[in-house]
Image: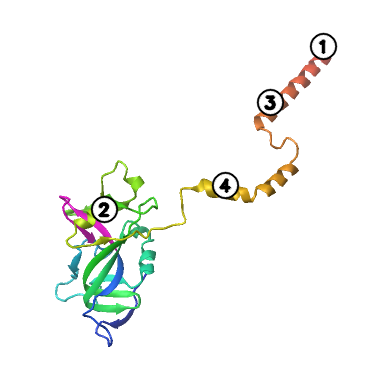
Amino acid sequence: MLRLSARSPGSARGERPDRPFTGYKLAHAVLSADGTRAAFTGLTLGAASVYGAVADAGCVWSKRHLPPRRWCGCGFYCLHDLTDARALACATENRSALLIEVAASGRYIRYERGLRYSRQRVRAVLDARCGCGRPGTALADAGSGLVGWRHLTPVCDTCTTGRPALALPEFTARLDGHVRVGQLLSGSPLTTDISARAGEGAGEGAGEGASKARELPAGAGESPIAVLTAEIALLHARLDDLQSRLDK
């Protein structure tokens, strides 16, 4: 799991706390019980806290201080680099999360790889991946949830067939602020078109395979059933010959 190592507080010289930072993070999608509202939840500490497109962080342990506090883990988290966020999405427990772009502002603490901050605005949904490996173009009921909210999981066009689902633009339209759906980043060398690549591999080794076939002993390519039938016929012939000798 990626870790944020502390570097300097947000009040350090040269920082611009009045200007939002662009960050990337993972979040689970949720839908209200009546289906009219959409929102997000966090991955670990914030998994039980629902937030909208624009939200202020709260501490789950104490209401006596404002997030983020240096000696507490409260506040929103985001990563500076999109590559780090995509790497985090590969973890088993994060496979059903959405990759989103946020504008981080308010009080914040800067780390080597990201920020912990008090206020955020979700700008875009950048990626979603179906459990089968294809890009997730819609969201379906995940079979879990919180009181008043159902967890949603990304599904592709193929896996959506016959299953109630909500297209990503329909999900973002139910949020409490404008959030765009970007061109999904999901990409993988894995493919369902194996036959073409298998044919290419067979073509490359065709010459070598043909020469080896010529070197095989006679009958090596015959069916095992045919060989067994021939042996049984030979055995019958020997028994007939033996019986004829005994009769003499």
The answer to which image quadrant residue 1 occupies is bottom left
Earlier in the chain: of badge 4 and badge 1, it is 4
Magenta segment range? 26-40
Earlier in the chain: of badge 3 and badge 4, it is 4
Q: Which residue is mark 2?
A: 152
Dot 3 alpha-carbon crowd within 10 angstroms: few under 14, some 14 to 19, many 20 or more: few
* Distance of label 3 from label 4 (alpha carbons): 35 Å
* Distance of label 1 from label 2 (alpha carbons): 86 Å
Earlier in the chain: of badge 1 and badge 2, it is 2
**Discs 3/1, front:** 3
Earlier in the chain: of badge 3 and badge 1, it is 3
**Discs 4/2, front:** 4
| Pointer 4 with pointer 2, Cβ within 8 A | no
**Tag 4: amino acid:** Gly
Of the 4 image quadrants, the one containing the C terminus is top right
**Tag 3: amino acid:** Thr
Towards the viewer: 11 or 102 = 102
| Pointer 1 with pointer 2, Cβ within 8 A | no
